[in-house]
Amino acid sequence: MRNCIYGYVRVSSTDQNENRQLIDMHSKGVPEENIYIDKQSGKNFERPQYKKMVKRLKCGDLLYISSIDRLGRNYEEIQKQWRILAKEISVDISVIDMPLLDTRNGKDLMGTFIADLVLQILSFVAQSEHENIKKRQAAGIKAAKRRGVHMGRPQKSLPENFIELSALWKQRQLTTTELIKRTGLTKSTLYRRLRDYHIVRKNR
């Protein structure tokens, strides 16, 4: 039986757009029926589509992921799932934005060592960034309250994935126009909220 190509896509909520990841999958020739999409947090792997995909994977299949944080944001869980996929099921994994994380390359001892090292670093960074975002969010709320900024209604409420969308904007994966469209905020309100949460982008 011919080995299959799969793609896994994750966004944090129904409000976040998965188009960029789908473009990645299509560019790699992943069949539409083999693309699995979860719209929920990456804190654990209790995700219906991920579980469904894992049940279909078999030895020799190839799995594409846009970036390591799309797999998850918990350091230990990322490591565990990578071992399950690569070692127990024996599928190849390719992280599109990090060519070093491609199990098809460097299957010798040194190649495996380098890939494992890069995986540990990136999964640690993914969790650290997530925790830092939450800390900045809490600090931003506290600072805003001290300034008398009303954080709840009747102000226009922020989408649940505002922090993650803002992080993408900060990393220049979203333009300001796209961020305004996805959050539903006016430009002035958007910048005010970004300041409230201490989210800034250099050379905007």
Image: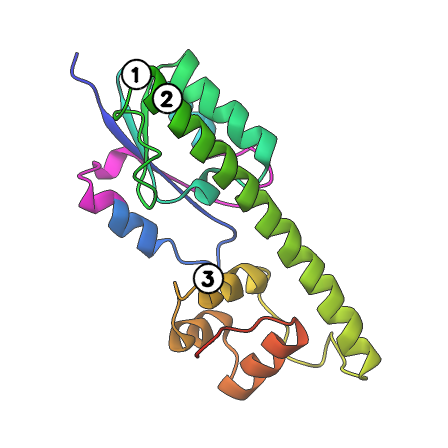
Q: What stretch of residues is rendered in magenta?
A: 25-49
Q: Is residue 181 above or below residue 54?
A: below
Q: Which corner quadrant holds the C terminus?
A: bottom left
Q: Quadrant of residue 89?
A: top left
Three-letter amino acid code of the residue under disc 3 = Leu
Answer whether labels 2 and 1 touch (C-beta < 8 Å).
yes
Q: Is residue 77 above or below residue 180?
A: above
- Of the residues under marks 2 and 3, which one precedes in the sequence? 2
Q: Residue at x 17, y 39 (%)?
A: 29
Residue receiving disc 2: 112
> Looking at this rendering, what residue extends furthest in the bottom direction?
188
Q: Residue at x 25, y 51 (%)?
A: 23
Marks 2 and 1, Cα distance to the nearest angstrom?
6 Å
Residue receiving disc 3: 168
Q: Secondary structure at mark 1?
A: loop
Residue receiving disc 1: 108
Residue 31 shown in magenta: yes
Q: Quadrant of residue 59?
A: top left
Q: Secondary structure at mark 2?
A: helix
Q: Is residue 189 above or below residue 194?
A: below
Q: Secondary structure at mark 3?
A: helix
Three-letter amino acid code of the residue under disc 2 = Thr
Q: Residue at x 65, y 55 (%)?
A: 132
| Residue 155 x/y as whole percent | 68, 81
Three-letter amino acid code of the residue under disc 1 = Asp
Q: Residues within 10 Å of mark 3 (few under 14, many from 20)?
A: some
Q: Can the viewer see residue 41?
A: no
